[in-house]
Image (cartoon, rainbow, N blue to C red):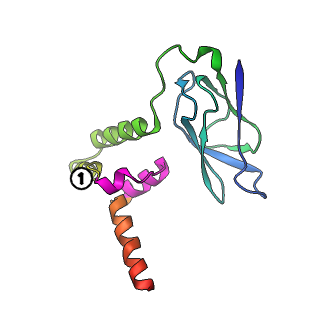
Amino acid sequence: MIIEIKIPTPGESITEVEIASWLVSDGDIVEKDQEIAEIESDKATLMLTAEEGGQITIKAPESEPVKVGSIACTIDTDKAGEGTPAPKKEDSVEEKKSENVTKTDDKKEDKSETQSKKSNTQSDVKTTPVAEQMMNAHGVSVDDIIKGLSRLDKNAV
């Protein structure tokens, strides 16, 4: 059976969104409730999840405006047990980090290695791929952000 996954509404006045990134590839096998795409609007960033397990067919292009309610992708549930499952979001992020390390110069490589050694605090915090890219670009870790927020809380009192 083919399941249609539609673009959700991030807010009342929003009529279009953009698929910031697909976390799976066309033809991948996905699991039920797996995060498959990151959707951005003027007001919010949402994760699109698979309603059922099966083979995904991507219908909406990445980085182009898409109307709320339109079909983002379909999932063929009859092919749920076939093929190799798509990597989970965490796997994709780790793969991208290792690719980034090989593509950067020595100075940036040292910074990426330091950031890839996550503390216990970081493993409890979920970040979007866009947030990961921004933190990497500015040399900031989740721990740095948490420490900064802690200082703000103390100053607010």
Vertical side of 108 occupied by 78: above or below: above
Instruction: Considering the whole magenta stretch, tell me its main secondary structure.
Output: helix
Residue 18 at what x, y percent from top left? 65, 46
Please tell me which residue lies in front, 19 or 157. Answer: 157
Which residue lies at the image location 25% right of the left edge and 54% below the top edge?
111
Specify whether residue 9 is in view: yes
Which residue lies at the image location 64% right of the left edge and 19% below the top edge?
77
Vertical side of 95 occupied by 65: above or below: below
Vertical side of 135 occupied by 102: above or below: above
**Is residue 56 on the magenta stretch?**
no
Instruction: Give SS at disc 1.
Output: helix
Is 145 on the left-hand or right-hand side of 44? left
The residue labelled by disc 1 is 114
Residue 2 at what x, y percent from top left? 71, 21
Q: Is the residue marked by circle 1 packed among few (<14), some (14-19), or many (20+) residues within 10 Å?
A: few
Is 5 on the left-hand or right-hand side of 53? right
Please tell me which residue lies in front, 90 or 65. Answer: 90
Residue 84 at what x, y percent from top left? 46, 18
Is 132 on the left-hand or right-hand side of 103? right
Q: Quadrant of residue 69?
A: top right
Q: Specify the amino acid type for callout 1.
A: Thr
The number of callouts visible is 1
Q: Quadrant of residue 99?
A: top left
Q: Quarter of the image containing the C terminus? A: bottom left
Which residue lies at the image location 75% right of the left edge and 55% below the top edge?
14
**Is residue 122 on the magenta stretch?**
yes
Specify whether residue 140 is in view: no
Tell me which segment is drawn in magenta.
Answer: 119-137
Q: Quarter of the image containing the N terminus? A: top right
Is 50 on the left-hand or right-hand side of 65? left
Residue 75 at what x, y percent from top left? 65, 24
